[in-house]
Structures are given as C-alpha cells and as structure tokens.
Image: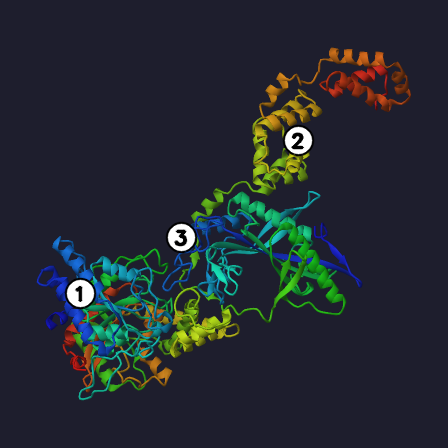
Amino acid sequence: MSDLTNLTLAEARDAVRGKKVSSVELTKAFVGAMEAARPLNAFVTETPDRALDMAKASDARIAKGEMGALEGLPLAIKDLFCTKGVRTTAGSNILSNFVPPYESTVSQNLWDAGAVLLGKTNMDEFAMGSSNETSHFGPVFNPWRSRGSNAKLVPGGSSGGSASAVAGDLCLAATGTDTGGSIRQPAAVSGIVGLKPTYGRCSRYGIVAFASSLDQAGPMTKTVQDAAILLGAMASVDPRDSTSVDVLVPDYEAGLGTGVRGLRVGIPKEYRIDGLAPEIDALWTQGVEWLKAQGAEIVEVSLPHTKYALPTYYIVAPAEASSNLARYDGVRFGHRAKGVHDITELYEKSRAEGFGKEVQRRILIGTYVLSSGYYDAFYLQAQKLRCLIARDFTEAYKKCDVLLTPATPGPAFAVGEKTADPVSMYLNDVFTVTVNLAGLPAIAVPAGLTADGLPLGLQIIGKAFDEATVLRAGRAIEMAANFTAKPAEWWRAA
Amino acid sequence: MSERSAKTIKGQNGVWEIVIGMEVHAQVLSNSKLFSGASIEFGAEPNSQVSFVDAGMPGMLPVINRKCVEQAVRTGLGLKAQINRTSIFDRKNYFYPDLPNGYQISQYKNPIVGEGEVMIDLAGGDSVRVGIERLHLEQDAGKMLHDQHPDHSHVDLNRAGVALMEIVTKPHMRSSEEAAAFLRKLRAIVRYLGTCDGNMDEGSMRADVNVSVCPEGGYEKFRATGEFKHLGTRCEIKNVNSMRFIAQAVEYEARRQVEIIESGGAIKQETRLFDARAGETRSMRSKEEAHDYRYFPDPDLLPLVLDEAWISEIEASLPELPDEKKARFVKLGLSPYDASVLVAERETADYFEAMLADGAEAKASANWLNNEYFGRLNKAGLSLSEGPIPAEANSAIVQMISANTISGKIAKDLCDIVWSEGGDPRAIVEARGMRQVTDTSAIEKAVDQVIAANPDKVEEVKAKPKLAAWFVGQVMKATGGKANPQAVNAILKVRLSLPDEG
C-alpha cells in the first residue's frame, strides 16, 4: 500500500484512469498514511469518512466513463479554505468551532474535477507566520530532519501543514495560500514544489482573508507537472471575486515539455543580499548553470527597490489584516467570551481569548499604520513603494522572460529557534514577498540538499498571468536538479 | 439672491445669521443590496434578508451591484452634477454589532458624483440655488433591537449592506424654511428619477443637518471668499426624519447657539441628536470623542470605472425633471407659483398633463386643480391617486367652464356629483340640464320679470349702483344658476341704465 502514497499526482491520475487502482484503494492508502503521521500534526481536521464517500462516488463515475481532471485523487486542503460542512479554523481559536455553510470557489473547482478531500491542513494562525508555530492547534513538524539529528524542524509557513503532508506522502497534493511567501517558503524548506499564481488567477471567494490585495491560492505538489495539473483545476475567473481576472487558463501540463532554449532568465543583483548563506549562493549559481546548459540566455537585471519590500509588506499586510479580522467580534460566529457585561467587554475578551500573539501583534501594527496622523507616513508611503516595486519588475521584464532567485535565505530551522524574534522570522520571506507586492506568479522548486541533508529550493518568478513559462522554467530546474531524496518516515515509529 | 428668505435671529448684542448644510442619506431603489444579492424589501422578518456577505462571514467578498451604480449616476445627472469616471470604495472601520464586517464600505476621497446643484422653490415663487458638494455610495448598517429581552440586545441585519446615496450640500441654506424646501425638492428629484422612494417614515430618506450661526454679514463674506472662518462653528444634528422636525431642529439649535455665544460661551463642534418629543437637540458626542475611522481603499473592490457610453445612455433616459417641467408650465401661461405646486410631485404633474392631453387649457386647469380639486382632496385627507376623480373627468369640467357651457358655480356642483357618484361630467351636464343659459332672449325675459316684480329696488339701484349685484342674484336664482353671469350683467346694465363701471 505504501507504494500508492509514493505516487505523484500525475502517476496516480494515470493509474486511476487506466483502472490500475480505484479511488477507494488510493484514498484508503492516504487515510492510513495520514493517521500514521499524526506526530507531524499536519492536519487540523481529518475527514476519512467523507474521503471514502467521495472516493466511492468517484469510482462510480469512473465506471461510467465520466472522469474529471482530478477524478478520485485525494488532496489535502489548507484550513484557510472554507469547506461546506467541514470545520474551517484558519488555525485560530476564534474559529475553532466554525463550520462554514459554503464552499470556497477553489475547493469547489477541485471537487468539480473529481478530487477527494482527505482533510484540512494545519497552518499559522490566519496565515500569519513562516514556521507554522503560531497555530492554535500546535506546531507542524517537517518530515525532514538534519542528518544525524532528531531535533524537530519547522515545515515553514504559513502553509506548513500542506507542505508537511505533501513532503511526508500523506496526500497526493495540497492547496496552499501565499500572502508573502506562505506557499513557496514552506515548499522550499520541505523539499516540494509550491506555486503562487498571479494575483487574480484563483478566486479568493471562501478563503478566509488575511491581506486581500496579496492573498493568492496555489498548488503544493511533489513535482512541477503536478503543480501544472493542480493549478489548471484551481484557477478560474469568479463573478463572486471582483479581483479575479478573466484570462484564459491554458493547458499548463501540455506546455511543460517545450524546454527553455532561448528563454531569457534574469538574475536580480539585489537578491545577492549581505550574509547570504554560501550554500544558498552556490545553489543559485548552480541553477544559473543548469538553465544555461539547457539553452537559456542569462541576463543580469536590477530590482532597485527590493530592500523596501519587507518593510512595505509589513505595513500593507497588517493594515488590511487589521480590517479583515474586525469581523471576528464574538457577535455572530466563532469564539465568544463568557461572563461579559457589555459590548466593549465582549469584543475585548472574545478577541483577546480568540487571537494568538502574532495575530494580535499584526492587528496592532495595522491599526497603527492606518490611524489618523500616521496614515500618510506609513500606509500611503507603503502604497507608493509598492508601485515602485511593481515597476522594477516591469523594467526587468524588458530584458528577460523570467527571474531566477533563491526561494529562502536558509533551510528548515528548529522549532522554537525564531519565535522570540519576530523580525528574524519575517526575514524568511525576503525572497518571496516582492512577488506578492507586484502580484506576479512564482514557483519554488526543490533543487538540492544542504550539507546536513535538508532541502533547499530555487524560485522562478514570471510575468503576470504567464504561469505557463514559470512552470516550464521550473520543470527545467527540476530535471537538472533531479531531486529524488525523500525524508525517512521517522514519525511512523514515533 | 442671498437675502431672499434668509432668516436672522435678533440677539441681545446684535443680529445673527443662520447657515445650514445637509447630509442626506437616500436609500437606492434597487432589487438587492449594494454588494450582495439579498433583497431589500421593507418590513420583512428580522434577519430574513441577509446573505453570507452581509453577515460578514469569513471569506465572503463584496461584488458591486450595477443597478445601484446606475441609480447613483442617474441621481448625479439629476443634480446636474459632475459624474466622476473613476471612483473608489473605502473601508470605514469601527466596531458595532450592527456592522458585521467591523467596517462600512463607503466612498471617502473619491466619490462617484462631484459638485452639482438643486434649485429650491420658495413660498413667493422665487428659486434659490443650493450647491451640492458630492454624492457617494455606501452601505447601510443593520438595526439594534433593545426591546426584545430584558438584558440582551438583538440585531437585525436586514438593512445591513443596503445601498445608500449620501448627498452632501454646501452650507447654502439660510433658514429652516429653506432647509425644508431643499429636502422637499431633493425628494421630488429622486422620485422623478426613480432612484429613491423618498419615504421618510420608513427611513429610506434621512437627513443630518449642520447648523451654525454667524454675525450679520458673515455669510456674504463666506460666499465672496469661500473661507469658512467667516462662518460659526457647526453642530451636526443627526437623523432628523421629517420636514417638520427639520424646521424645529434648526430653529431650536440656532437659538441655542446664539444664547451660548451671547453669554460669552463658545460653540463646540459636536454631533447632536434631535429629540422630537422634547423639541430640542442634545449632545451625542464631541469632536474629541469622534472615532478614528482608519479609512483606506477596500482591497476587495477594484476602482469603479464608468463607461462613457453607459453614462450617455443613462443621461438619455432621464425623465423631465421638476425644474424643466416648471419652466415649460410657465411657458404655457402658469404663474411660477402654480407651476411649482404642480411639479412638486411627479404624480401631480402627470395628472395635470393628462388633463391637458385631454384638451383642457393649461391656466384654467391649474386654477381648477390648485383652487378647487386639491382643496377637496386635502379636506378628505386623500392623496391625488386616492382621489375619486380621474384626470379626464376634471379635464372635461375645465373644458366646459372654458367653453361657457357651465358656470363656475355649476362646475362646483358638478364636481360634487362626480366626486360622490362618478360618471362622465359631460353626460351629467346634459342629463341634469346644467348647461349654462347663453340664449340672450331667455335671460332678457328673466331680467324683465325681476325688474317688473321689484319696482322699489329699481329706484334704489339708480342711487346705489352696487345694488345691481342683488338683481344678478335674483336672475341667477330664477334661471336655476344656469344663466351666463356676464350676459346677465350686460343685460341688467342696459335695462337699469347703469354706468359702465358698475
């Protein structure tokens, strides 16, 4: 049975279509893997019964020859996507008992394609974090450990549960969301592929909002091909999301095979930051060589406002979050404090009890930067910088088609290592956050191991709505890197 | 113009001018809310018209309702205002249980409609221009219910998310009469346009009134320079929800401010609430206590960009508005006053025009409606649509008066009959022999009979020509009121040898 869980999404799809395996068999294998992997804490809510029901329904459709793009394939869904009738927590105490009466557009698209829901994955609370340690449901552990060490490592965040579930073969693939790097950073440090699509490519309807102008859903998969398949099913223009964009969703999978000959790959010099780890630097150089060897043209480009990206992000995202999270007030749904005497006390206690420290910190920052007297100095300046950062990319794309950068400044770190210093935690997003501010697509692809045997990723950034080229370049890295390492399944013995 | 109906207050140490500006919230007539598909029908069961978006559920997103935008543009065009091709929705953040998202979606720096104007009609028939500062779209909040439970408050979200147009005037009104006239005119305009039902009882039109007082001459200086320093500190009176209350609130507030200033105090900028029962305004919150709303552009909504062709299409579909209608009626020979009475409600103007279409003459129709029929409706407590006489019937009556078929007096009798029994006025006149007698020989005969029967009166009238009226009365009586009064007068004059001016 464990053979089945090793399959990629594409392999499983072909096996199901070829009737070599049924959806029920496949689903049972993953339910077993999911249950055996509880020490990883990757799931907040497991839905084995629903999974088997959906699998049976899939098998019935397959028998009739009705097959969706993901027919019968078990997936894990980040607990930020509202799932009708299945608890959706956003990793927060304030929503710990929230069962949505509606389905997010992205997850609905997946069910419409025949996919099976295995469960809802753990995440940083309201997607605020880079290590999955801010979750009300406890930290998620990375399936990977340093060579010769039993120390538990974080899977990155905020989509840490999804990353851990894919890396540990607990599902065929998972959904994530990326506001400042929340798909790509955990993918990179967990040795999997993570794609953040262009802002507007996937509908945000039914995804619990963190920062509306930055949030974007995307696939987290074992291979680039799998990312192409899953993105094709997730993406759609949605009349219920005014910021979704009506741009044709091409057949990403079909476009993968064409190679990178003649592709102009930009290397942004500002990403060679002070103190860049030699291993990361070396991997980046290696990536350049790989692409060059496959016929790509390498050009140096400049993104001069890169250094402002993190500060800009930490104004824009908390500002929007402070407003988006105002609805969690204990009045209509979610956690409500007991023993209160008036409405102010109800708000204060419900929110103090319901939100964790990092969420409270960001609400405070966001409230501050929008306040009268500070708005111009912070929020307005940040908006201007955001425009400049976006323009940097527009300028760079006059000289190249995609950019190649490291995905993270380092590998997975130990649980508890960075929780005391929020700024060092925020620095995890230094290579990813510019992409969100500019609304562009980018992919993190596993490209190598550190000396300690931990995965590292490279990032390909593309032009708006050009996920096809991003995937194609990502595939070129994947082929060259030939990343086949797997973590030992230590949790089965735990 | 400015001294028109401006009212001043004589204080102990001088004369004070009243300056008024208004913010009117008008509920948009549409099928659904501003950003959701939920119904907006008035009077539904609490919380029966609430979508997941309205309830602020996690992951729900607003989607702008095209109809509401169209209505705002239509209203803007009706206010002769600038239509902004790009406008932006912002979030106004504050916590309250009737505000599910913890923010209201509104338009702050970039409203959909810019400067415009409303001409208000005053009692004497004069018109005064009131400048419009802006119109923007925003969501209404829900409603708190405090009387359902001894120690719990309930909330009804039916109204949450309903589209409102906030219409802000410049401080161009100078008396409570002007303020009330403005609101009346604004209501007429939106009703003509079909963009708001203007129903103040149901809260679909609500006004906040800004009142300040300044020493005599201050307003003129403000108009000349545009500098607000010439005006006094204003107080905002919230939710004044009838024309009568507006007048009361303004009067009370202006006097209160004058008294404070004259006794050496200063006016604090604050929000006040009008207590209709006590007829006074009371402090609600001061400027210092005002919320910091932390406005910022709503990232869930793109800037609202209007298509030029669509605006033209809306413009082409505008009905004739009260001012244009009034001008046209004046051209038909009506006095400005009569015309403004007739155009005040679209229904009235339509009724009037139906009479004209049926052949009645304009001035005679206006006189008949304003002097006769509206009085009857008023007395009976009926609106025009509830009244028993259709426009065609009143038109027939007016046409018969104009053609001297019936006299004015008979017309009133005829009106009584049509009012209570219905029927075709022309047929009634024929059937009941109400036609005016214009046959001079018949009238001469009646005149001669009256003269023959009253020789003493004939003597008297020679000394006192005013007594001729007595003879007219007698002749009318003898002819059952059907004699043409002009003919009676003319014949009497000859027979009694009266002087011309009689």
Q: Nearer the viewer, residue B224 or A359?
A: A359
Residue A392 versus residue B382 in the image, above or below: below
- To which residue does mark 1 refer? A256
- To which residue does mark 2 refer? B368
The disc, 2 or 3, on the residue closer to the chain's N-terminal end is: 3
Circle 2: element type: helix
- To which residue does mark 3 refer? B37
Q: Amino acid at mark 2?
A: Trp
Can residue A370 be seen at all in this image of the molecule? Answer: no
Mark in the foreground, 1 or 3: 3
Q: Quadrant of residue B62?
A: bottom left
Circle 1: element type: helix
For the residues marked 2 and 1, what is the alpha-carbon distance in whole angstroms? 84 Å
Residue B330 image offset from top left, x and y in percent: 64, 36
* Chain containing mark 1: A
Looking at the image, residue A165 sits to the left or right of residue A437; the answer is left
Q: Quadrant of residue A222?
A: bottom left
Q: Amino acid at mark 1?
A: Leu
Mark in the foreground, 2 or 3: 3
* Chain containing mark 3: B
For the residues marked 1 and 3, what is the alpha-carbon distance in whole angstroms? 41 Å
Circle 3: element type: loop
